[in-house]
Image: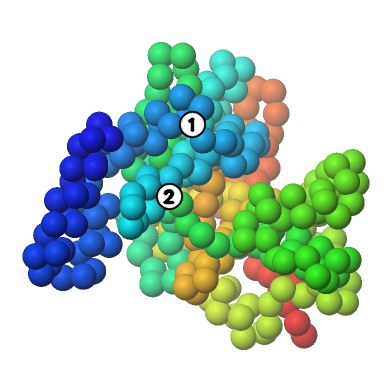
């Protein structure tokens, strides 16, 4: 399969040398078979050729390159082992809902990552392949501010993993774990500390306006993310000015809800699970905005 991708790339290179438009070279991925790309990058994970990027309740995340001499494209692979104890979460549902948002909700400044494929192995392992987006989540921005306040010379982290690593280097595993957990559980924790503001008023207004437009359109499709306020890792700000919503594992398509309360509430035999309104993320953005 890798040979077929290599041949395709080689063909595109030859065409470029014959006078094809320069930007066509960088559109190679658009003409590749998504299923072949999916199979290739999942194989890199199952054969242990790449290391884990992050790990959480939703499973493992890997960053997989598709490298060539002159061009390199990265993909994210989400991996989860189906758990018979957790009937609520299925990676196929996350794939389906994220794909619906990608396909149906269009905005010039807010997006979700493009999906390439889903695969389930006989072992019960599920894989979802999507494009890799370089950027910093609100979580990473906040951790960077915390590190800079205590160690000004340390370079800011490019992503969540680097941000976590910097805190471990600064305070050691025990205190770092407590600090990072506190940031996730208490999003407002450092908002009153001088020097911990993340946004100017103009930046905050742009982010909120773009997000509100996108969320309004998403809600018109009856799709709700439900994990923006509780997890500030799920909004990523990119160098090109775009905002990406990621991690749709708690999202839901609610077609027959009687009211908004039912959208953000799940009632099962054992518990009632409450989610925060998607738009409550605006309160966190305001808390970290310069006055």
Secondary structure type for disc 1: loop
**Residue 177, position in %: x, y?**
83, 43
Q: Residue at x 58, y 59 (%)?
A: 235
Measured along the vertical axis of the image, is residue 202 above or below residue 48?
below
**Residue 145, position in %: x, y?**
77, 68
Front residue of 237 and 53: 53
Can residue 161 be seen by looking at this rendering? yes
Q: Compute the Cα span from label 2 to label 1.
A: 14 Å
Front of the two marks 2 and 1: 1
Left of 149 or right of it: where is 162? Answer: left
Front residue of 52 and 16: 16
Q: Residue at x 67, y 84 (%)?
A: 201
Left of 207 or right of it: where is 16? Answer: left
Left of 108 or right of it: where is 201? Answer: right
**Residue 56, position in %: x, y?**
65, 36
Q: Residue at x 69, y 34 (%)?
A: 272
Residue bearing the label numbered 2: 74
* Quarter residue 199 falls in: bottom right
Q: What quarter of the picture does the N terminus occupy?
A: top left
Residue bearing the label numbered 1: 49
Q: Residue at x 35, y 64 (%)?
A: 106
Colour approach in the figure: rainbow
Measured along the vertical axis of the image, is residue 163 above or below residue 126?
below
Can residue 222 be seen by looking at this rendering? no
């Amino acid at each position: 399969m890798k040979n077929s991708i290599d041949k395709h790339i080689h063909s595109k290179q030859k065409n470029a040398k014959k006078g094809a438009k320069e930007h066509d070279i960088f559109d190679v991925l658009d003409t590749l078979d998504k299923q072949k790309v999916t199979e290739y990058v999942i194989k890199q994970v199952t054969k242990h050729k790449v290391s884990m990027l992050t790990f959480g309740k939703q499973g493992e995340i890997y960053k997989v390159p598709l490298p060539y001499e002159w061009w390199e494209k990265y993909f994210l692979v989400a991996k989860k082992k189906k758990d018979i104890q957790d009937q609520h979460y299925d990676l196929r549902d996350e794939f389906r809902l994220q794909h619906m948002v990608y396909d149906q909700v269009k905005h010039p400044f807010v997006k979700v990552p493009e999906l390439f494929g889903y695969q389930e192995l006989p072992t019960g392992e599920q894989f979802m392949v999507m494009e890799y987006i370089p950027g910093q989540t609100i979580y990473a921005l906040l951790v960077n501010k915390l590190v800079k306040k205590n160690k000004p010379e340390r370079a800011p982290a490019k992503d969540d993993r680097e941000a976590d690593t910097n805190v471990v280097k600064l305070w050691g595993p025990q205190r770092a774990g407590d600090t990072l957990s506190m940031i996730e559980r208490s999003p407002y924790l450092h908002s009153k500390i001088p020097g911990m503001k993340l946004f100017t008023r103009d930046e905050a207004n742009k982010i909120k306006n773009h997000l509100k437009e996108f969320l309004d359109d998403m809600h018109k499709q009856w799709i709700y993310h439900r994990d923006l306020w509780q997890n500030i890792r799920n909004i990523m700000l990119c160098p090109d000015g775009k905002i990406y919503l990621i991690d749709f594992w708690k999202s839901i398509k609610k077609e027959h809800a009687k009211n908004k309360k039912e959208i953000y509430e799940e009632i099962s035999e054992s518990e009632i699970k409450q989610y925060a309104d998607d738009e409550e993320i605006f309160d966190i953005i305001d808390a970290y905005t310069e006055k």
